[in-house]
Image: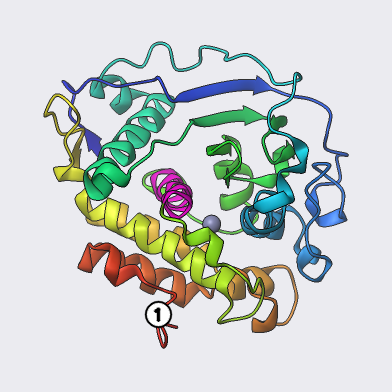
Amino acid sequence: MRFNPKARLDTSRVRDRGRGSGGGRGGGLGSGGGGGGMPIPGGVASGGGVVGIIVIVLYVVLTQCTGDGAANGGLDGSRMADTQRYASCKTGEDANKSADCARVAVENSLYDFWGDELGSKFRAEKEVDTFTGATSTGCGQASSDVGPFYCPVDETIYLDTTFFDDVLERQLGGPDGGFVEPYVLAHEYGHHIQNVLGTMGKVKTQQGPKSDSVRLELQADCYAGMWTKAATSTEDASGEVLFASVTDQDIQQAIEAATAVGDDRIQERSGGRVNPEQWTHGSSQERVAWFKTGYTKGDLAACDTFAPGAL
Ligand SMILES: [Zn+2]
């Protein structure tokens, strides 16, 4: 993955909230603690923070942040000010040198891609917020163990930047570096697109191999594939292409990351049986397949995981 050195970066939607404290009880989501206001379903809690990451995205989406789930009332006064972490990110050259600036570049590319794709239906996310430790969100307090998630209440993607080293690589055995973070961000951005398009409102069943939640997650993987394919041809407002290259190795890393976060793989790694009735995100094979569908077909209709017979 390389960025066009001349392209300009737009940091207006990317914020860093620094190191937060409080909220989490230190035990992580696996202990049923961590992140007050964000309980996870007991049946899948045994895998510790690892399962929490995967589950929380969905669980927050489905139970905390839809309809009257907005009981937390949006952002509270404890939210920390932006640390200016991204202030020095000006160009694609900066993104080639710095993981932080690369994050800005990925957000910019996702914003540009989906703006083109949806046209007048598009609405930008409010922010991509990074943090360490804990942060308050429109969906409640998030602790470090939560991992990346999208909160529909404040239309913000939250990302603990230690996730990739600490959790994805060490606990889940996923790959490190390269295109892993772009894949994850693209998946979360896919949830924002689902929110914009009203797809989240269709979700009724939350567990099981053909549940709506699995369909929602696989669709987000498909959307990530769509963007990945188009990244090197997506132009910003001034007509510059931000992504100069996405290599086969990058694609392979996205696929490995999708494999690592499949429900079956997570259940195996947490020492349990593979029990599809508890699935919320789909198997490794399905996640990879839908990413590839988005990548090869490149259109929204091909990503209709809710269609009869799609799964
Ligand atoms: Zn997701």
For mark 1, give the secondary structure: loop
Q: How crowded is mark 1: few (under 14 residues within 10 Å), some or many (20 or more)?
A: few
Left or right of 284 in this view: 10:
left
Q: In this view, does 106 lie above or below 85?
A: below
Residue 291 in the image: x percent, y percent? 36, 65
Q: Closest to the observer: 154 or 241?
A: 154
- Label 1 is placed on what type of residue? Ala
Magenta span dominant secondary structure = helix
Q: Is residue 212 above or below residue 27?
A: below
**Would you say residue 246 is visible in this rendering?**
no
**Would you say residue 187 is visible in this rendering?**
yes
Q: Mark 1 points at which residue?
A: 307
Q: Closest to the observer: 56 or 196?
A: 196
Q: Quadrant location of residue 197?
A: bottom left
Asked whether residue 159 is drawn in magenta, I would say: no
Q: Closest to the observer: 65 or 216?
A: 65
Residue 166 in the image: x percent, y percent? 63, 43
Residue drawn at 24 percent across, 49 percent down? 117
Q: Residue furthest bottom?
A: 309
Left or right of 3 in this view: 38:
right
Q: Quadrant location of residue 111?
A: top left
Left or right of 215 in this view: 271:
right
Residue drawn at 34 percent across, 36 percent down? 106
Q: Quadrant location of residue 204?
A: bottom right
Residue drawn at 66 percent across, 71 percent down? 206
Residues drawn in magenta: 181-196
Q: Which residue lies furthest to the left in this view?
A: 239
Q: Closest to the observer: 124 or 40?
A: 124
Q: Is residue 181 above or below residue 43?
A: above
Quadrant in which the N terminus is drawn: top left
Q: How many marks?
A: 1
